[in-house]
Amino acid sequence: IFLIVSHPYCVYGNYCCKLCSYEFLFDYTRVRDKIEAFDPPVYFEHSVNFIQNLRRPRLIKTHLPWFLLPEQIQSGEKRPKIIHIARNPRDVCLSYFHHCKLFEGYTSHLDHFTQLFLTGNVSYAPYWTNVLSYWEKKSELNFLFLKFEELKSDLAGAIRRVATFLCKQLTDNEVSRLAAHLSFENMKTNKGTNYASLIDLHRRHNLVCEEGTFIRTGETGSYKLRYPQELSTQFDEWVKSGDVDHKMGY
């Protein structure tokens, strides 16, 4: 079993790790044309059966914190390889806000949503409980801890780290081709990753009226353009209180 873990709304980073791992585990030279099959609707309705029947080796993506993983994993009885992808919580909050407006009909403003995020009143909260539960285990041999910011600054380097972690050897040409496939521009227009059909369905049935895309900007630090000074200061204090030893560097 292989796990890809993250707090929600590290969208581009999630897909990079996911598709990269599919390439390595299953040698999918046709992966570019088959992405739609990775998240079939049955996953949402019958998740346990879906996971049990996955082709081996199983590659499972989850947003659950460590303490909600199966007991066999927590006890060390089973030691799957786990890739965790983290992102600056300020960017996470902004991405989460747009997701809720686009998919869940959230109609309030960013300031209000940020207060919900900071007080742990959103799904998969509290953020620090979730992320730090994996950070504490990053030195274990079956763990690879990545940051979204690393993917953006050096995608080829991140691909090599994932390949090494999964015991795969890549040529420079293979790394270049995979990096091109996993580029943000390609991911945003790929029907298998941009959820365009679901967004269109929501709009046609008037479930939401928000304009936008599932994979938005893929940038680091975009929160700086959206948060007023007062909100930025509040976020900074929240980061200091949550990551008391400044382990994550955010």
Image: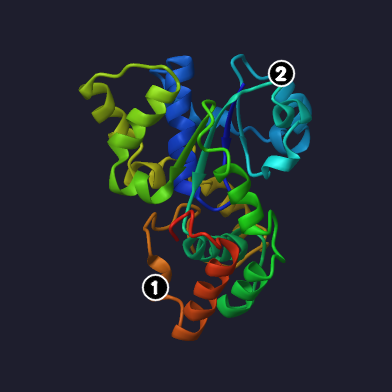
Q: Nearer the viewer, residue 244 or 5?
A: 244
Vertical placement of residue 11 versus 45, above or below: below
What is the x, y in percent for residue 127? 62, 58
Q: Which mark is residue 53?
A: 2
Vertical placement of residue 186 versus 245, above or below: above
- Left or right? Give the position of 143 relative to 164: right
The quadrant in which the C terminus is found is bottom left
- Residue at the location (50% across, 85% down)? 230
Q: How many marks?
A: 2
What is the x, y in percent for residue 45? 77, 37
- Left or right? Give the position of 31 relative to 157: right
Q: Can you identify the residue that label 1 sits on?
A: 224
Secondary structure category for the residue under label 1 = helix
Secondary structure category for the residue under label 2 = loop
Residue 70: quarter of image = top right
Work out whether mark 1 precedes mark 2 in sequence or the reverse, and give the earlier one.
2
Say which amino acid is labelled 2: Asn
Say which amino acid is labelled 1: Lys
